[in-house]
Amino acid sequence: MSFIGKTGSLIGLNALRDLVSDSMAIDMGSANTIIAVRGRGIVIDEPSVVAVDKITGDAIAFGSEAHKMQGREARDVMVISPLVDGVVADFERTRALLDHFVREARSGISHFSRRAIMSVLSEVTQVEQRALLSAAEEARISRVYMIEEGQAAAIGAGVPISDEHASAVVDIGGGTPNVAAIVSGSIIASRAERIGSSDIDAAIMDRLRRHRGLTIGVPSAERLKLELSSAIEPKDPNKKIEVRGRDVQTGSPGAVDISAGEVYAVTLPIIRRISEEVSNMLTELAPEVAGDIYDRGLILTGGGALLDGLPQYLQKELGLAVRVAEDPRFAIVRGLSQLFEEPLLLRRVARTEPHTLIDTEATAFET
């Protein structure tokens, strides 16, 4: 075959491979998993939970379907979060969850994913990283790049890749806040503390159990956080919401009113710890970098950035301007998706060399 003929065949094969495969950006967090597919945008945005049959050990529901069961499970069913503090705590359930979401994200004619870019914590260990890679392998993703969350969040928040001055991004997820300083698309300093907005849920549950004699579930705690929680003193601390649960002493159904002031009291220590973590990272920066961040302030991303009053609290505590990125929950996955258009930067900033997990050539046309 002539060179032109071979070239034409190769172009045709690549075009067909693009047709039957998906390139994915995956932000798999403790609270939610968000997946964007190149050319199609965000296709998955669901809770990172799995419903498991206690008798057989089989996973019977994932994501939103499993979340609906939480707190009201059948006696032979339990709902678990296989990722804790942003890392894999239960490998088998994480594998099953990622496999389910990836299958749901694929287009109707796609049977494998040629590439995926996944976000990881800045302080993830090699063991934890390998667990995510193994889960991706089970989900039939051929090549995986690992990118630090702070890096992806900065790009997704609009920090120019070519910017030679430093920017600072604070990504607050369900299990962890990531703090990163970025220059020219690369991280120059970062920290991750394993405490996040889900700790507010736990603090609310603990407060009601210890001081009000009522045990509530995670869904009720989440509702109280969304409706009453604030990083600054609430305008109406006496605003109350009735919450129902189980009486600690009698075991019978019960209900109490909880005020915005009470929720603020348990929220503040967690917000203070996040602020201290940001402050600690800033003290480690080089003078020129610190000067850039003083000029520019901080960018907040992640679902926790939507907490009422958080920008004002951090601005007061840190003495820096603070702004919330547009659609902060999706900043990481936007940044990961953008890296598909910047292959040289992707290879430069990937935490490791891309891992080839399955034989792309052999599986390109499998059904």
Image (cartoon, grey):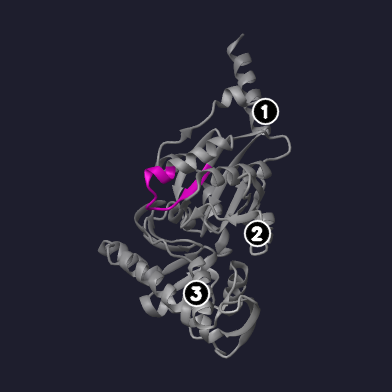
Q: Which residue is mark 2?
A: 67
Please rate how many residues cluster around mark 3, counting C-alpha atoms within 10 Å: few if below 14, some from 14 to 19, many from 20: some
Indicate the quadrant containing the N terminus: top left, top right, bottom left or bottom right.
top right
Image vertical order of residue 188 relative to residue 243, above or below: above
Q: State the residue lying farthest toward the front.
A: 250
**Residue type (three-letter) at the residue carrying disc 3:** Asp
Indicate the quadrant containing the C terminus: top left, top right, bottom left or bottom right.
top right
Q: Which residues are magenta?
A: 117-129
Image vertical order of residue 241 relative to residue 220, above or below: below
The residue lying at 60 percent from left, 15 percent from top is 6
Q: Are marks 2 and 1 in contact (CB under 8 Å)?
A: no
Q: CA distance from mark 2 to mark 3?
A: 21 Å
Q: Which residue is mark 1?
A: 16
Please rate how many residues cluster around mark 2, counting C-alpha atoms within 10 Å: few if below 14, some from 14 to 19, many from 20: many
Please, what secondary structure does the residue beneath circle 2 have? helix
The spot of residue 223 in percent (x, y) is 62, 73
Residue 159 appears left or right of 328: left
Q: Which residue is mark 3?
A: 206
Front residue (pair 206, 286): 206
Residue 279 appears left or right of 312: left
Mark positioned earlier in the residue sequence (3 or 1)? 1
